[in-house]
Image: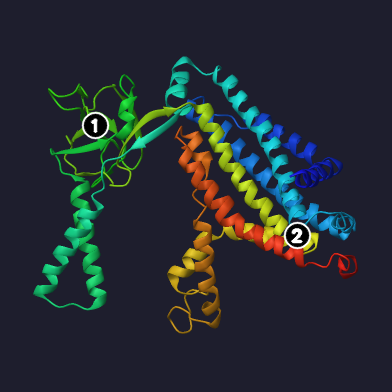
């Protein structure tokens, strides 16, 4: 450990010698202070947090990511090119210790910079929130500056699949169809069954039951929030539809009803507060919707109904969000060091940026895989192209997407700006996938390459 810390200390000295730490710290603080001044919010709690959290954290992540890649590529590659590494390698220290020491030095720099910028965002957010009107401050405290978990009704996915298989079997016993038609028929049956679960005809009622689980133990006396979204079968002259709600079970739990229909727009999310203590002793919350319109309404299974409740404080949630960003910085540091272990500084930086750019091209790769061709439609033959390039590119795209999909969903910024809870388990999974599962093999490759590199001839080969 003493040897690792010595290498980490040298990395800190190099960062200060090149003014990297000071420059990045100034840029981070300038973005935290400058963005809210340059970009005006709409005066609402959500608009306020979107400016302060979404934009500032995005800029912080981008600046830290680029500086991490630059330092990771430069601190190892330049030490080799300038013959400083040859002097270190002659000391009684293993090369894997040098490599890990560099990584620890970069990550400790990132920890310091992320702590400074994160604390600045948090303090500025608390200070600026006092400037909002009292009503918006209440929304901020209850809906935004909070860590809210969610519970949804069951999707009945297994039941839908079983009923789909049963109806498909009955249909196939009556008539024979081709394999393509069978697949299409199965999809039609499944969509019909899902539609029956989602559709609320005019004048009809639709109940949902949401299980709050273990959260029922601390939600007594706490207000809940109902988040709903629906689609309409036809347009309304006013652009909105009436919605009558009842939450709770008569004579069993406390009951809440809307005194008159709410006016809600389709195809958008609506969130409103409901009183506490509406669930039963088992933590089951019963929600009843009555459709007073002449048009059928459809509540999507995935996000049509959602119950939000307070789980922890915003400060703890913010710290967990910064922890996920720190995991991404660990992966970028590993990538840069792995590239610099066998390449010169310019080539290592170019290779790292190319890999980083590939992660932003997932939609293009997904489209190519779904089309079955990189070249797309062939105007000469009138069919999808199947060139020799596809034989190599498509399997590569599939492998790359599998790797990227392991970690692409771990983005804390949207959750923080929406007041959604980032749990300890999510942070643990992010650490396992990003740092261990993706960064571990990269670190192994980097250490192996660095062990095999001929340092004595490195200067002459550049």
Outermost residue, bottom side: 381
Depicted 195 relative to depicted 339: above or below? above
Q: Does label 2 or label 1 sit earlier along the sequence? A: 1
- Local packing at callout 1 (Cα closer than 10 Å; few below 14, some 14-19, many 20+) is many
**Quadrant location, the N terminus:** top right
- Of residues 241 and 18, the one drawn nearer to the viewer in this rendering: 18
Q: Which residue is disc 2 drawn over?
A: 340
SS category of the residue bearing label 1: strand
Depicted 53 relative to depicted 184: above or below? above
| Residue 226 seen anywhere in this rendered image of the structure | no
Q: Which residue is disc 1 drawn over?
A: 285
Number of labelled discs? 2
* 364 left or right, relative to 259: right
Residue drawn at the location 74% of the way across and 52% of the way down: 72
Q: Which mark is residue 424?
A: none
Give the mark toward the camera: 2 or 1.
2
**Quadrant location, the C terminus:** bottom right
């Amino acid at each position: 450990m003493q040897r690792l810390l010595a290498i980490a200390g040298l990395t800190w000295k190099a960062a200060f010698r090149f003014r990297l730490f000071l420059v990045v710290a100034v840029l981070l603080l300038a973005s935290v202070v400058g963005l809210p001044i340059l970009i005006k919010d709409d005066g609402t709690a959500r608009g306020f947090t979107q400016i302060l959290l979404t934009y500032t954290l995005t800029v912080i992540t981008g600046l830290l990511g680029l500086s991490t890649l630059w330092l990771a590529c430069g601190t190892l590659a330049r030490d080799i090119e300038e013959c400083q590494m040859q002097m270190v390698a002659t000391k009684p220290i293993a090369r894997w210790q040098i490599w890990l020491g560099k990584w620890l030095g970069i990550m400790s720099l990132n920890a310091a910079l992320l702590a400074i910028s994160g604390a600045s965002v948090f303090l500025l957010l608390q200070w600026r929130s006092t400037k909002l009107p009292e009503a918006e401050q209440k929304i901020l405290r209850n809906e935004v500056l909070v860590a809210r978990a969610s519970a949804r009704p069951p999707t009945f996915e297994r039941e839908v699949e079983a009923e789909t298989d049963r109806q498909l079997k009955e249909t196939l016993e009556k008539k024979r169809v081709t394999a393509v038609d069978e697949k299409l028929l199965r999809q039609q049956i499944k969509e019909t069954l899902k539609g029956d679960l989602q559709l609320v005809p005019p004048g009809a009622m639709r109940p949902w039951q949401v299980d709050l689980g273990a959260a029922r133990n601390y939600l007594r006396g706490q207000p809940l929030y109902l988040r709903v979204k629906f689609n309409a079968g036809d347009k309304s002259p006013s652009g909105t539809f009436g919605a009558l709600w009842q939450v709770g079970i008569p004579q069993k739990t406390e009951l809440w009803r809307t005194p008159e229909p709410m006016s809600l727009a389709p195809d958008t999310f609506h969130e409103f507060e409901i009183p506490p203590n509406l669930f039963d002793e088992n933590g089951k919350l019963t929600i009843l919707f009555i459709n007073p319109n002449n048009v059928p309404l459809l509540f999507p299974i995935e996000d049509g109904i959602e119950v939000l409740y307070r789980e922890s404080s915003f400060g703890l949630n913010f710290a967990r969000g910064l922890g996920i960003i720190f995991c991404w910085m660990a992966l970028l540091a590993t990538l840069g060091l792995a590239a610099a272990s066998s390449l010169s500084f310019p080539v290592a930086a170019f290779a790292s940026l190319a890999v980083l750019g590939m992660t932003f091209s997932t939609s293009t790769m997904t489209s190519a895989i779904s089309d079955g061709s990189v070249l797309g439609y062939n105007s000469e033959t009138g069919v999808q192209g199947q060139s020799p390039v596809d034989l190599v590119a498509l399997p590569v795209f599939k492998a790359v997407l599998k790797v990227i999909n392991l970690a692409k969903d771990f983005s804390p910024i949207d959750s923080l700006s929406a007041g959604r809870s980032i749990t300890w388990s999510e942070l643990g999974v992010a650490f396992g996938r990003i740092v261990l599962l993706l960064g571990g093999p990269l670190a192994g490759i980097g250490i192996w390459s660095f062990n095999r590199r001929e340092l004595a001839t490195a200067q002459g080969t550049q």
